[in-house]
Image (cartoon, rainbow, N blue to C red):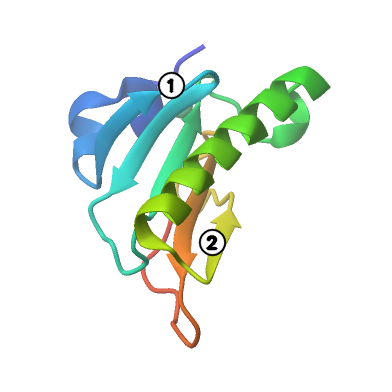
Amino acid sequence: MKDVNCAYCMQGELVAKFAYPVCKMDTGFLYVFKEQSHPGRLILAHDKHISEMIELTDEERNAFFADVAKASRAIHKVFHPEKVNYGAYGDTGCHLQHASGSEVQGSVRVGRYI
Ligand SMILES: [Zn+2]
């Protein structure tokens, strides 16, 4: 089920306010954030409008994290970070998504994830 107020469900203009579409992955859609305080800052929005990871079956969760790992490999390949940070935040929405961004020693997280 889609939520008409959810940027990740509706895509298009709602997502375009803060991200560029990259590609469809096996379990969701990958976006790159316009705000790149952490180079390569991405978000993988799950195909399902669900709030919590516990709503996925073990198989679905494993497939989702396989996609997260693929996206992380791309960040490493392009940006060569010391570390990629991961997060699943729902500050302003409740669509399961996983954010990734590179981290260099001593940098500070800025901005917020939705
Ligand atoms: Zn949604």
**Which quadrant holds residue 4?**
top left
Relative to 74, say whether 58 is above or below: above
Q: Amino acid at mark 1?
A: Asp
Q: Amino acid at mark 2?
A: Val
Residue 69 vs residue 10, the one in the foreground = 69
Query: Which residue is the extreme one toward the top?
Result: 1
Q: Is residue 30 visible?
A: yes
Residue 64 lies, in percent from the top left, at 63, 29
Q: Which residue is located at x 52 percent, y 34 percent?
A: 95
> Looking at the image, do the residues carrying marks 1 and 2 touch, with CB atoms under 8 Å apart?
no
Other residues around mark 1 within 10 Å, as few (<14) / some (14–19) / many (≥20): some
Q: Is residue 1 left or right of residue 53?
A: left
Alpha carbon separation for disc pair 1 and 2? 30 Å
Q: Which residue is mark 1?
A: 3
Relative to 51, say whether 108 is above or below: below
Q: Is residue 75 left or right of residue 83?
A: left
Q: Which residue is mark 2?
A: 84
Relative to 84, say whether 29 is above or below: above
Residue 54 vs residue 43, the one in the foreground = 43
